[in-house]
Image: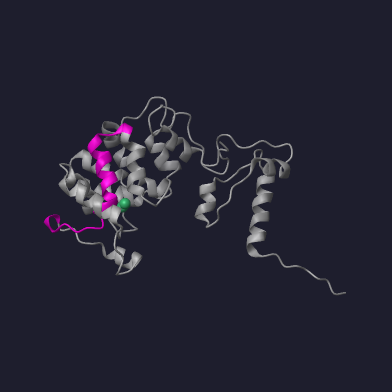
């Protein structure tokens, strides 16, 4: 007998597995349009269609069971431990700044400079990261993180900062920052806090030692003194960026 199978493509099978996994779960887990855009698709999970495919189930409106559980009143350190995909680069940058004798403000800026990359989004990560922390830190720290987005592309011989070799490898030798980055750099150059942001670049360790022992525990005191941890928990405090923290906590919440 000549059985004729229509072999499923890898992505069809992956979709099926995803679907099966979802059936095992209590709630229907959806992906935001932005998640599809990141896959190169302009799509969305339509409510009615999803309901029809998962009869008798409701949409997820809180904790995603696939992710580490967050405490009821999360702190910045809880996000470091349970939502930041990688913290070695941040802790190493902060350690570098600390050993260099930099003030705590700079150490904190180094510790938080790439939190957007490790928890949220790469594109324009300096801007996103600055917004996330703005309500909780000294204005200068948020400004420095915002501006490192542009500054890291431009050398400053006065502090021994050259264009990163790694960027030549990453973006090609001909990469030129866009005009908005150049304009931001020119603005930052004139600013009284220029050097604070520049110090993020100086302490930005591009090739860190994978064996160096670094731990966020070593920075709990500096965070305690320089980051205004809201008593309601980061995300539940009604600050202008609380929703960003909630989204990182509940990335698959339906609405
Ligand atoms: Fe960065
Ligand atoms: Fe960095």
Q: Residue 136: horizontal and vertical position, in percent?
A: 31, 32
Q: Residue 78: horizontal and vertical position, in percent?
A: 42, 37
Q: Is residue 207 above or below residue 249?
A: below
Residue 63 located left or right of residue 18: left
What segment carries the magenta color? 135-159
Hey, which residue is sitting farthest right in the picture? 1
**Location of residue 47 (image quadrant):** top right
Q: Residue 147: horizontal and vertical position, in percent?
A: 26, 47
Residue 24 in view here: no
Q: Name the residue rendered at 39%, 42% in the picture.
A: 80
Q: Name the residue rendered at 41%, 27% in the picture.
A: 238
User: Would you say residue 102 sits in the magenta stretch?
Assistant: no
Q: Using the image as rendered, state which of residue 185 and residue 7 is in the foreground.
A: 185
Q: Using the image as rendered, state which of residue 75 and residue 7 is in the foreground.
A: 7
Q: Residue 44: horizontal and vertical position, in percent?
A: 59, 47
Q: Name the residue rendered at 57%, 44% in the picture.
A: 66
Q: How is the image coloured?
A: one colour
């Amino acid at each position: 007998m000549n059985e004729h199978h229509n072999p499923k493509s890898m992505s069809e099978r992956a979709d099926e597995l995803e679907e099966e996994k979802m059936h095992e779960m209590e709630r229907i887990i959806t992906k935001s349009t932005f998640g599809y855009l990141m896959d190169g698709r302009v799509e969305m999970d339509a409510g009615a269609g999803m309901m029809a495919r998962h009869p008798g189930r409701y949409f997820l409106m809180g904790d995603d069971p696939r992710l580490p559980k967050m405490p009821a009143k999360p702190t910045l350190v809880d996000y470091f431990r349970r939502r930041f995909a990688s913290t070695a680069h941040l802790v190493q940058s902060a350690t570098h700044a600390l050993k260099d004798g930099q003030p705590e403000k700079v150490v904190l800026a180094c510790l938080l400079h790439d939190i957007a990359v490790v928890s949220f989004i790469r594109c324009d990560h300096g801007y996103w990261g600055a917004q996330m922390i703005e309500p909780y830190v000294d204005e200068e720290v948020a400004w420095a993180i915002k501006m490192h987005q542009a500054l890291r592309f431009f050398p400053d011989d006065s502090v021994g900062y050259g264009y990163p070799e790694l960027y030549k490898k990453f973006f090609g030798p001909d990469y030129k920052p866009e005009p908005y980055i150049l304009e931001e750099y020119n603005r930052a150059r004139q600013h009284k806090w220029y050097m604070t942001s520049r110090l993020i670049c100086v302490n930005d360790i591009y090739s860190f030692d994978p064996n160096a022992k670094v731990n966020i525990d070593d920075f709990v005191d500096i965070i305690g003194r320089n980051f205004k941890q809201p008593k309601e928990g980061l995300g539940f405090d009604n600050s202008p960026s609380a929703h960003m923290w909630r989204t990182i906590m509940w990335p698959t919440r339906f609405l």
